[in-house]
Every structure is written in structure tokens, then in C-alpha cells.
Amino acid sequence: MEKLGLVRDIDLALHLPLRYEDETRITPIAALRDGDNAQVEGIVRDCEIQFRPRRQLVVKIDDGTDELWLRFLNFYPNHQKTLGVGRRVRVRGEARGGFFGREMVHPSFKGVDDDTPLAAALTPVYPTSATLPQAYLRKAVASGLQRADLSEIVPAALLPAGLMSLRDALRFLHHPTPDVSLATLEDHSHPAWQRLKFEELLAQQLSQLQAKQERALQQAPAFTVHAGGLQEKLLAALPFSLTPAQRRVVEEIALDLQRPVPMHRLLQGDVGSGKTVVAALSAAIAMNEGWQCALMAPTEILAEQHFRKLVGWLEPLGVQVAWLTGSRKGKARREMLARVASGEAGLVVGTHAVIQGEVEFARLGLAIIDEQHRFGVAQRLALRAKLQQGALEPHLLMMSATPIPRTLAMTVFADLDVSTIDELPPGRTPIVTKVFSDARRDNVILTIADEVARGRQVYWVCPLIEESETLDLQNATATHQQLCEALPDEMVGLLHGRMPSAEKAAVMALFTAGQMKVLVSTTVIEVGVDVPNASLMVIEHAERFGLSQLHQLRGRVGRGSVASVCVLVYTAPLSPTGKDRLRAMAETNDGFEIARRDLEIRGPGEFLGARQSGAPLLRFADLALDEALVHRARAVATTLLAQHPRIAEQHVLRWLGGKAEYLKA
């Protein structure tokens, strides 16, 4: 029960059914059609154990209109007792055509008398775990529903017109009457569901706004932007000009950094829009005042990419940049830690190693998290705890190349200020996306040979299958072997997550320098890798990737002035979701449109990945469909916090219990 989060009476009352079974009526056996899920009642005429082709219990029942066979491949002695010849039984399951006539396989059943009443309401089927039977859960939920305090907390004047009371809505959803439209229960459009969705969205909005208010009470270092300071020097030294969107975003961040409360800003921009330079210019403001900055990336490859760029930009200006990852060991690591602890290193770049216990900062003023959706909530909470420097808390800038659709920005990210880089730097060429079946793999290899002959470079990405990394490595290794044979005069590299860091770095260095023409890789190159000469990206088993991941991978090419192509290779047959993803990729290069479609296809839980522990808090509302309710909940939340803070606290406690902490990450 605890694993399911069912600790309090209110948790049980809010544990709503996944679906319902109709045990309020009996269907005559003669009226059954293949595929019908129905309840029948009859007398057992035959009950025997058969051994063809394997041991099974086969039962025949008769209701006077026809006969029905029941088949059990797993059964116990009490099955035979309840289903003894001459007994009256009530059976529920899916009817289908069998060898001897219509049958049900593994139906639910119970012994009844002639006068056993039918259920008065639809029978709920609850989300459960393998060891918790439905019968136990139904009893627990029913008693929790009776005991829970379901009084109205929110003043009636603030509720949208026409909503049911919370008590009525919950009682109805646990035990709906047989005359209700099942479709309105299943698609959550019934008025009872509307009330639950509103309550949930209100709790979620309140908790986010509370987190924002709490942060406004904390103190952070207030920086001054000096004329002729480090930021201006960096701008002057850059070999390119900022786009208007980059300049606007830098100004938004600079204004935040000048205030004595912690910045909590999300910087979103499409793949290749230039977020790293914005991060460097933001860090320059803090470092100019003698404070340190930390930049954390989810993978060593991405962290190293940032490190190289930042060293190139900042070290000529006298800033020391430290490098911290899990693979850095021994004396080199100890020296790096000493430079961070003394304050000598102005900027610290690395993976989650940056938040490990032994890392101590002298004066941390700004923390930057890249690809923030790849870090779990627990990691971000650990980072915030790590960052507190006495009374002062550092500013926090999170970056994402997966743009957040508007409804998500208003709900799950409501506690953040959002800055958007909505244009690409000049000179970027649009990427053409083509979709091929793996039956045309040879054609793809010929295209690679053509690109290499023109002096271009190529990526070939194989999927990472979490359940079977060995299968993934065989896949990448086999592809590497095949390309080595097809291109005997060229260097073809192989990169995967199990390689030692030094080996990965050596492979990437050869590819970046242009000596290696083809790189076969797992998804370790998903983000941040920047090789302007790479003009072709082949993604194998593209149907296994999420849309935002496909878009990230596609963004590894088209980074120079040459026309670039992304080839999505799929294995038939495609699922409807797979078709939708590949169609979306072929139709648009716009990251914001990709994000919108991703939300439609996958829903917010998967889309968010790990704010991720915050996502399951929206169990009932559908952000793709309930935008109007989101707006209403936001307005009510603002009024409650301003005028009825105690009521706001009660509402959040009822819905979230102790989980509200996760929303602060």
C-alpha cells in the first residue's frame, strides 16, 4: 500500500479506478459475440482436467439459451470445488470462438444462489501492484472513502460554475451508476472528472507558486554589471555577433542577477541556438565580482564540449576554468578540488561529480544546469542543498534544448521564469529529413560513401536499449564492422557508453579534428557535440527513439554552411506512435512544434522525464486537453495565496502530502 502512495484516508479516496467492470447485468450466453466483455450466469454441466496440449481445467456451463466453455491453464483445487457439476456460477470475461464452441479463458467467477443480487453500481478496477489483490484494495478504498475528510476547502465563490461537490464527485467515480456513459468515464470528460482535475491542477499551481514565494524570501548575492567588466571583454573577444534573441535573453538574466533574491530561470532554445555563449556571458557577470560559477552537464562528452568552448573564450581573459568528472582521479582530481575550494577556479565545469560531497566551493554565486530535464529531482535538490553558502543562496540557470510547450510552462514549470532564444544564428542551413525502411540500408551506405568522398563527415547512431545493453553493443559493433568493410580507405570510429573515458575522448578528438570521417555511436552523442563539417546523420531503429531525442540527434548536423541530411532508418512494422513520430520529424525542423507534438504523442509524464517525480503528481488532468482548466486553476491559486493562505496550505496538504518538496527542484 505504501509503494502505491496509499498512506492516508485521503490517499485512498483519491486512488481512482483505471476502468470499470459491469456486474450490474447478466448477458444470455446465446447473445454473446466474439470480443464481448460480459457477465453470464449458468449451471455447471461438466468440469474436468484435460491434458491436451497441456494440463488445463475445462468447464462447461449452460444458462438455458446456450452453452459456454471456460478454460483455465492455471488453477487450484478450490477452482474445481466452486465449479463443481450442478453448481450455479456467475462468470465474467471476454468471449471468443473456441474449438468446441464459444469460450472464455481465465474468466473471473463466483458461486451464487438463485436469488444472489446483482451489483448496484459498476465495479471499479484500481491501479495496483502484483501482490495486492483487487478485492483487498476495493475494501480499503471503500473504508478510506468513508473516513476521509472531503469537506469543501475552497470558497464556493472561487470555484468554476457548475462543478459537482468533491464528495459527490469521488463517490460517483468509485461507484458509478450503470446508466452512465462509459466513454465519458474513460476519456475523463464526465463532470465528476472535471471536478477532480480542477482540484488537482489547483494543488499543483499552488505548490509551484508557494515554491516561488519561498524563494523570494531567500537571499542571493546581487551582482553589478560593470562597464568595461568581464562580460563586455568577453563580448568583444567573441569571433561572432550575438543574435537579437541572444542579446534579449542575456539582458533578462542580467536583470535577475542584479536582484538580491535567487534567480530561478529556465533558458530554452532550439538545438544550435547558442545557449552556451549566453551561459558564459551570465557567468562573466558573477565572476567579475569575485564569485564562482558551476556548469553541470548530464554526460562527460557534453561537459567536455562546454569545457573546451569556455576555456577558449575565458582563459585569454584571465579566468581559470576547472574540469570535474567522475573519471578524473588521483592527483589531477585533488589539484582540481583544491583550486575549486580556494576560489582560484572561477568556473567549474563537469558532470554530476560537481555536486558530490567532497567538492567544496569558496564562493558559489551562480549554478548553470544544462539539459536540466536529464537530471532527476533528487539530484537537483542535492545541488540546491550543496549550493547554500551560509545565508546566501546562489542563482540558478537551467538550460534546455527541448522547448517546453506552453501548457507545461504554465503548470509543471510554473515556478520558473522562462527565457527563450527563438532564432538560430545566421549561416545555419536547414536540415532535410528522409525516412527509409531498413530494407534500403545498402542505399544509405552508398550515400555515406558519396558524402565522405566530398570530404564531409557522417554520424551513424544506434539505439540504446536499456533492457539489453549487450544487444545494443552488438548492433553498434556490427554496423561499425559493416561500414569499415564498405569504406576500406577511411577511418570509421565506434563510440559507446561502456568505453573508458580516455578512449571516448580520443575517438571524439579524431572525429572533431576531421581525421575520422564516420562515427558509429550509441546515444552518448545526443547533445552538445559540435562538428561543423558533419553533414549526414543516420539514425538506426529511429522508431525506438522519442521525438525530442530524434530532434536532438538531428541537431548534430547542419552546424556549418553545408546542406545537411538526417536519415531515419526504421524497421517495419511501425506502431501508430512510431508513424506519428517519423511523420513529425519529416514535416518540421521547428523544435517548438516538435515539442508540442511530443506532448500530444507521449503525454506530460514521459515528456518531462524527471521533473520527473513532479510529473506523476498530475494523475488526472491532461495538459493537451485541459488548457482552459489550467488557466482557471492558475487564477484561483493566485487569489487563494493572496487572500486565503491557510486554505491554500490545506489544499496542497490534502493533495500532495509530503510530495510538494519535489516541486521545489
Image (cartoon, rainbow, N blue to C red):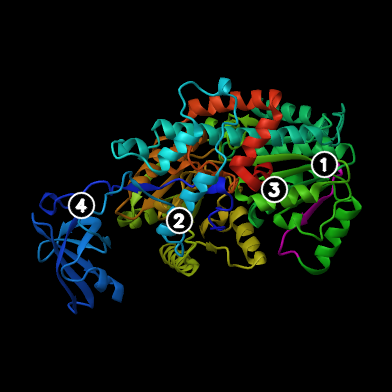
Instruction: Determine the CA span between mark 1 and mark 2.
Output: 45 Å
Q: Do the residues bearing badges 2 and 3 touch, measured as CB atoms within 8 Å?
A: no
Residue 393's disc is 1
Instruction: Determine the CA span between mark 1 and mark 3.
Output: 24 Å
Viewer can see residue 279: yes
Mark 4 burial class by Cα count in 10 Å: few <14, some 14-19, many 20+: few
- The tag earlier along the polypeptide, 4 or 3, is 4
- The tag earlier along the polypeptide, 2 or 3, is 2
- The number of numbered discs placed on residues in the rendered structure image is 4
Residue tagged 4: 35
- The tag earlier along the polypeptide, 1 or 3, is 3
Q: Amino acid at mark 4?
A: Gly
Viewer-side label of 4, 1: 4
Q: Amino acid at mark 2?
A: Leu
On screen, 634 above or below 51?
A: above
Viewer can see residue 590: no
Q: Is residue 320 magenta?
A: yes
**SS of the residue at dot 3?**
helix
Residue tagged 2: 137
Q: Which of the image's four quarters has the C terminus?
A: top right
- The tag earlier along the polypeptide, 4 or 1, is 4
Residue tagged 3: 306
Instruction: Determine the CA span between mark 4 and mark 2.
Output: 28 Å
Q: 223 or 65, which lies in front?
A: 65
Q: Amino acid at mark 3?
A: His
Residue 580: give x, y in percent of width and height.
37, 42
Viewer-side label of 4, 3: 4
On screen, 63 above or below 153?
A: below
Q: Tell me which segment is drawn in magenta.
A: 316-328
